[in-house]
Amino acid sequence: MIPKHMMGNIMKQAQALQDKMAKTQEEIAARTVEASSGGGMVTATVNGRGEMVGLAVDPSVLEGGDVEMLQDLVVAAVSEAQRRAKEYMAQEMAKVTGGMNIPGLF
């Protein structure tokens, strides 16, 4: 059995970690990450949650009329931006948790 004073300390530490994780998640969500495809012809911007918040398409992409190519470039840019956001989130949360893998965190 864990002594009452030790349990209180553990609970305080857990609450402090939870507060720090919540603050870090808010900070991460406010950040943006960009990725480009087609040599910069399409650039996608996502927030720290991986939600797309911007898309830039170079007008020269539209001149050729190749819709399938444009679609592929958009998918590639968005996918890469989301991957980068997820990686960034994992790195930042690892700093908070000391590298512990906490189920359901990511």
Image: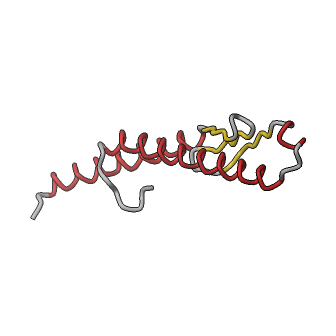
x, y (%) of residue 75? 68, 53
- Specify how the rendered protein is coloured: secondary structure
* x and y percentages locating residue 90 in the rendered image: 43, 46
Q: How many marks?
A: 0
Q: Residue at x 36, y 43 (%)?
A: 94
Which residue is at a point 77% across and 39% down the rendered structure image?
A: 56
Nearest the eye: 9 or 45: 45
Determine the residue positioned at 41% across, 41% down: 91
Name the quadrant of the C terminus.
bottom left
Relative placement, left or right, of 100 versus 76 is left
In the rendering, at what x and y percent does residue 55 appear?
75, 43
85 horizontally vs 98: left or right: right
Give whichever of 52, 67 is nearer the camera: 67
Q: Residue at x 34, y 56 (%)?
A: 102
Please tell me in which quadrant of the rendered image residue 42 appears.
Answer: top right
Instruction: Give above or below for 54 relative to 71.
Output: above
Q: Pick the residue in front: 77 or 94.
A: 77
In the image shown, does 5 or 1 lie closer to the viewer?
1
Residue 63 in percent (x, y) is at 90, 41
Image quarter in which the N terminus is found: bottom left
Residue sitting farthest toward the bottom: 1
- Residue 98 in the figure: left or right of residue 1: right
